[in-house]
Image (spheres, coloured by chain):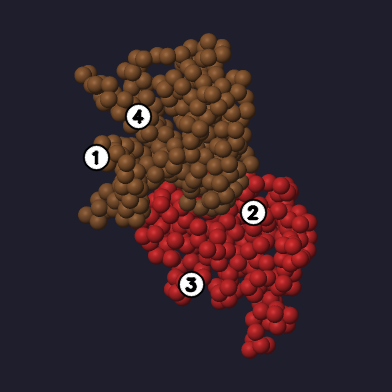
Chain colours: A brown, B red
């Protein structure tokens, strides 16, 4: 996968795709496997990003430990916010998480002594873009590995049972509440790692960007486009959408988002189970 | 005969706001019983099952399993203690295979590993007659098979008491006979059965005792014959033509 002679443009483009695969994959663990649609997933990306930034800027901590602590914090926050919100189902959980992400943005604005607030936060500059390419790629490997584990393990089967019929899972002996919290924590941890890498890569953080609700929307669209609750879904969804956007953006500078909107609506209407779902159905018919 | 009390329901009340769904219900199950529960719609049968399996908390009263109170225990804990249940409206894990459905019960209900759970689930699926269909999903089989699956998932948790909520509804007479045969085999394994059933012929023929609920109160208890001849039961439930 090494882009030996890749130009800056391609390196950046592929790194972005890896980032989106990781993010869509992180959401997929919670939404696709456990059945909890999360409209505030960007919160964990933002927490990871800001914690990494704050530790590097104010404590002079090296990148890797800072990123790791940021991801741990994201996971811990998921468990804390999950204790009340994971008792809710469906739209109620989704809306509660939307509010949580907005609240986290305000917290970052408020603690401007550390975070820079509305002025943003500048991180130490590191311009080895190949480094970011590889590290973002390794988050893709991590996400695929965790998803594969969900797919094949005892724990994963409990999560899928919760997604399909939570009460039946509970009376079959599954500690549904604990399983959901663990899944939420793992999902948030991955989003937190990616947030940390993003922070160091971009070298500048702004609350409105790091907690942008559009990031959540893209994760959701990508996961569902490819096929939520499947191993390959987020990879296909993220690559497809990113590629379509890139092509359209080059051709239609001003109207490409409208076309992207139509493409998404079309795919959702025609392929309710995503691209992977379509392929699976075709395979079954044979 | 020497009997062991396995489940004791003591003065159980459950209110939903103003509505009294269960009023001081007392039931005792002995080990090896097949206890039938009948009563008109809305008489509190499913509410009682939900109380036993920990889905609802009781307004007052207490339930004891082998002498241990089930108060404030979550449904998954109650399942692991040895009380399994099925749902009136089957709740399969639709996008998982039949084998995976039952494996969830085996792995989490009795704490088995994945390979052990798979062996156990295959064994139970053969026992209930789904051995050939383990790789299908619940949507690809008939209503009868989905009922069997519901039963298999409950059995996979290795229960000592199983609560069956109308598992025969919608079955043909032949299928009912098959189901009764299966229930007897389950009972012969030493599993105590507590079942809600609307099909009189079935519940009368298999139960060694029957209780009758009406408006949340237990109005009768006894052998099938005693219950069928009880005037209050006839009035409340069976209808005038049985008098």
Secondary structure beneath dot 1 equals helix
**Which secondary structure, mark 4?**
helix
What label sits on residue A16 in the rendered view? Answer: 4
Q: CA distance from mark 4 to mark 2?
A: 46 Å
Q: Could one spot residue B168 in this view of the protein?
A: yes
Q: Is residue A225 left or right of residue B34?
A: left
| Viewer-side label of 4, 2 | 4
- Between the C-alphas of marks 1 and 3, the distance is 60 Å
Quadrant of the image containing the C terminus of chain A: bottom left
**Local crowd at mark 4 within 10 Å, few (<14), some, or many (≥20)?**
many
Check if mark 2's residue and mark 3's residue have beta carbons within 8 Å: no
The answer to whether B167 is drawn above or below residue A249 in the figure is: below
Which residue: 60% across, 59% down? B163
Q: Which residue is mark 2?
A: B55
Tag 4 and tag 2, C-beta contact below 8 Å: no
* Label 4: chain letter: A
Disc 3 chain ID: B
For mark 2, does the 10 Å Cα neighbourhood hold few (<14), some (14 to 19), or many (20 or more) residues?
A: some
Rendered residue at 48%/12% (across/down) = A62
Pinpoint residue A125: horizontal percent, then vertical percent. Answer: 42, 14
Residue A234 drawn above or below residue B196: above
**Badge 4 and badge 3 in a common chain:** no
């Amino acid at each position: 996968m090494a882009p030996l002679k890749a130009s800056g443009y391609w390196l950046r483009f592929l790194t972005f795709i890896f980032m989106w695969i990781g993010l869509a994959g992180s959401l997929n663990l919670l939404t696709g496997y456990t059945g909890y649609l999360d409209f505030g997933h960007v919160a964990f990306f933002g927490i990871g990003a800001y914690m990494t930034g704050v530790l590097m800027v104010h404590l002079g901590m090296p990148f890797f430990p800072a990123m790791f602590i940021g991801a741990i914090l994201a996971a811990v926050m998921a468990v804390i916010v999950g204790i009340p919100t994971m008792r809710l189902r469906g739209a109620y959980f989704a809306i509660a998480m939307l509010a949580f992400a907005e609240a986290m943005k305000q917290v970052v604005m408020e603690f401007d002594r550390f975070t820079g607030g509305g002025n943003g936060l500048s991180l130490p500059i590191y311009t080895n873009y190949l480094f970011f390419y590889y590290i973002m790629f390794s988050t893709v490997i991590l996400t695929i590995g965790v998803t594969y584990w969900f797919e094949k393990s005892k724990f994963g089967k409990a999560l899928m049972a919760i997604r399909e019929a939570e009460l039946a899972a509970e009376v079959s002996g599954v500690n549904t509440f604990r399983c959901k919290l663990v899944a939420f924590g793992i999902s948030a941890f991955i989003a937190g790692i990616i947030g940390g890498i993003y922070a160091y890569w971009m070298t500048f953080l702004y609350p409105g960007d790091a907690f942008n609700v559009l990031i959540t929307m893209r994760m959701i669209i990508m996961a569902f486009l490819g096929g939520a609750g499947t191993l390959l879904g987020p990879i296909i969804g993220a690559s497809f959408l990113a590629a379509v956007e890139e092509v359209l953006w080059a051709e239609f500078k001003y109207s490409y988002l409208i076309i992207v909107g139509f493409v998404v609506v079309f795919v959702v209407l025609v392929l309710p189970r995503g691209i992977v779902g379509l392929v699976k159905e075709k395979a079954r018919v044979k | 005969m020497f009997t062991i009390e396995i489940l004791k329901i003591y003065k159980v009340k459950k209110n939903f706001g103003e509505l009294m769904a269960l009023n001081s219900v007392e039931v005792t199950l002995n080990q090896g019983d097949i206890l039938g529960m009948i009563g008109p719609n809305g008489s509190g049968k499913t509410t009682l099952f939900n109380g036993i399996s920990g889905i609802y908390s009781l307004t007052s009263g207490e339930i004891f399993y082998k002498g241990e109170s089930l108060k404030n225990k979550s449904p998954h804990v109650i399942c692991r203690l040895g009380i399994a249940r099925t749902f009136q409206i089957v709740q399969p894990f639709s996008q998982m295979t039949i084998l995976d459905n039952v494996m969830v019960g085996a792995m989490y209900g009795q704490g088995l590993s994945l390979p052990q759970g798979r062996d156990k689930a295959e064994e139970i699926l053969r026992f209930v007659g789904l051995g050939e269909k383990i790789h299908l999903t619940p949507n690809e089989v008939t209503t009868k098979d989905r009922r069997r699956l519901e039963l298999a998932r409950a059995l996979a948790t290795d229960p000592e008491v199983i609560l069956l909520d109308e598992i025969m509804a919608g079955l043909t007479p032949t299928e009912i006979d098959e189901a009764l045969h299966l229930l007897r085999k389950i009972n012969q394994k030493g599993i105590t059965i507590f079942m809600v059933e609307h099909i009189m012929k079935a519940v009368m023929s298999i139960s060694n005792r029957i209780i009758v609920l009406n408006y949340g109160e237990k109005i009768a208890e006894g052998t099938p014959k005693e219950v069928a001849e009880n005037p209050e039961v006839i009035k409340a439930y069976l209808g005038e033509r049985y008098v």
